[in-house]
Image (cartoon, helix red, strand yellow):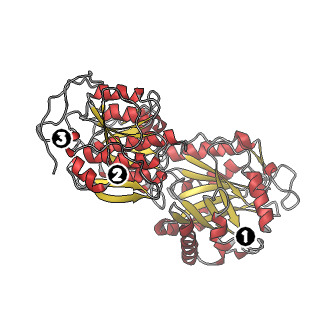
Amino acid sequence: MLVTRGFARTIAIVTASGVGIGAVASCTVGLDDDGSPAGIVQPEAQPDESDPGRSLPVVVDDAEGGLALGTTQQFFARAPFVVTAPVGDGAALVRAASLAVATSVPMLPIDPADGSAVLEEIERLGAGSVLAVGEMPDLGTVSVIQAPAGRADLEEMIGRGLDERDVPGTADSLDAIAAIDGEDATLLSLAGEPLPEPGPAAGADALPEFGRAELDPPVLALIAGPASEDGQAWAEHIAAAATARAAGATVVPLAVPDPRATAGSVSAIRDNEDATVVALGSAFGTVPELRERVRAAVSVPELPGGGQLVYPGRRMIALYGHPGVPAMGLLGEQPVDEAIARAVELAEQYQPFSAEPVIPAFELIVTVASVSAGADGNYSNIAEVEMVRPWIEAAAEAGVYVVLDLQPGRTDFLTQARMFEDLLREPHVGLALDPEWRLKPGEMHLRQIGQVDAAEVNEVTDWLADLTARHDLPQKVLILHQFQQRMITDRESLDTSREEVAVLIHADGHGVPGEKMSTWEALKTGLPDGVWLGWKNFIDEDFPTFTPERTMLVDPAPWFVSYQ
């Protein structure tokens, strides 16, 4: 049973950004007349002048005081009590998060040795007590109510029934918090981790009354897992997710701080166009940056597998080769429909070994290195766009990603990339550059291994990024093949700053496992920030060819695997 007796209220001042900075009050606080918590703040997003039908998103700043404090100040002007748990205690933090959601009050992680920062926030909220899970420091006159460990005792304390759910690990906590239904309270436990022994038991009437949160218009709270693995970072994120959910927001967990990241986040934004978007943490960028990404989530086509960012939302398993030429790789060993079925089957073999969705792909060679100069003298045979197009169209219908591979000979990569602009305007088509076949004047294939300088690659990156932005396309992958360090000179200067493009180094070494792993270790050393890694399996030249399981045991597990 939820008791809804009203209490006196404090006066709160709310800034234009929706952050409560209410005056500290000594009176008790509680519920509005309808039983909702009296101190919850509806985010007041500013109208978007460029799109009158929408409002600007809100970014919660985590620079001063941390993410948990910033989130509490965003959603709560006051509260009857707060839920606390010690930093570094995953079991206590996960349990406390579920109790905060069940009681519609903020959650704040606390340093067991120093509770001064939490105490200051408790005073701002006008809360006279905390519901504590785990060890607490001295909080002066604030009443510390220890949460009992047992479900029945907790149900009696909060006056609500509790379902129970295990969370596999701390990294799964954000998803578990987001999944708590607003109507049914859930008690979360970290699997395999015992809760700390509670302090002296408190009676069921010791907890101040609380209400049920509801925000109108609705709020989508975006949160990404912390960049750091330390306990403080996870404590901040768990508490922020719980506080937003406690206030009535729909929490959308993401692998990276970008609303375009997954099918789920894109769907949440598209299905809730009237919702105010609140990003928990400055990693989501500035308000203008986030506004553009939210706009893209609504209007830009999704990639195969969902979402609009290539990685980390999916892994790709590809057939490599040229249509109709079996000697160049698996792709050319069968017509397009059979190639799609084969790629799908390969992707399915990898799924048991990947936490991310695995999608089928083609790496289709569209300019083929040649031992003869040809009419243009470039030692590269260029496929007709109309010959390639049926493969592109069939792949789109089947949910297969396509990478167009360039072997340019004596011309440059950008010149050849422009020839396939029409195909690259498709949302499911990316680009690969193969420096092995990039010749200098006077060089010929098979006499030396080619190379390219990072400056030339960066020109392609900029062109591809501009094309993607101009045509409102999802992020594109740009694969750089490599099996020797010398193949990409000045590699540390590769530009990964253009968010329209995901740059991936693809390890093309073949041979026995030791040789392949030696190549892998060399190539992943000294990579610029923001570069992803891919791997190639050779059916006839690896001894033996790695199985899907063995391939995914490579460290780090490759994001793009091709078969030649």
Left/right of residue 70 with respect to residue 226 in the rendered view: left
Amino acid on which disc 3 is placed: Ser
For label 3, the residue is 36
For label 2, the residue is 149
Q: Nearer the viewer, residue 456 or 500?
A: 500
Q: Nearer the viewer, residue 188 or 199?
A: 199
As measured in the structure, the alpha-carbon distance from the residue carrying label 1 to the one carrying label 2 is 55 Å
Amino acid on which disc 2 is placed: Ala
Amino acid on which disc 1 is placed: Phe
Left/right of residue 384 with respect to residue 185 in the rendered view: right
For label 1, the residue is 538
Secondary structure under the numbered disc 2 in the rendered image: loop
Can residue 48 be seen at all in this image of the molecule? no
Decide: few, some or many residues near mark 2? Use Cα within 10 Å; few <14, some 14-19, many ≥20.
some
Asked if 326 appears above or below 293 in the picture, the reply is below
> Quarter of the image holding residue 46?
top left
Compare marks 1 and 2 and give the one earlier in the sequence: 2
As measured in the structure, the alpha-carbon distance from the residue carrying label 1 to the one carrying label 3 is 62 Å
Compare marks 2 and 3 and give the one earlier in the sequence: 3
What residue sits 36% from the left and 51% below the top? Answer: 178
Instruction: Indicate the quadrant containing the C terminus: top left, top right, bottom left or bottom right.
Output: bottom right
- Tag 2 and tag 3, C-beta contact below 8 Å: no
Compare marks 1 and 3 and give the one earlier in the sequence: 3
In this rendering, the label closer to the viewer, 1 or 3: 3
**Percent coordinates x, y for residue 306 in the rendering:** 45, 58
**Percent coordinates x, y for residue 177 in the rendering:** 36, 50
In this rendering, the label closer to the viewer, 2 or 3: 2
As measured in the structure, the alpha-carbon distance from the residue carrying label 2 to the one carrying label 3 is 27 Å
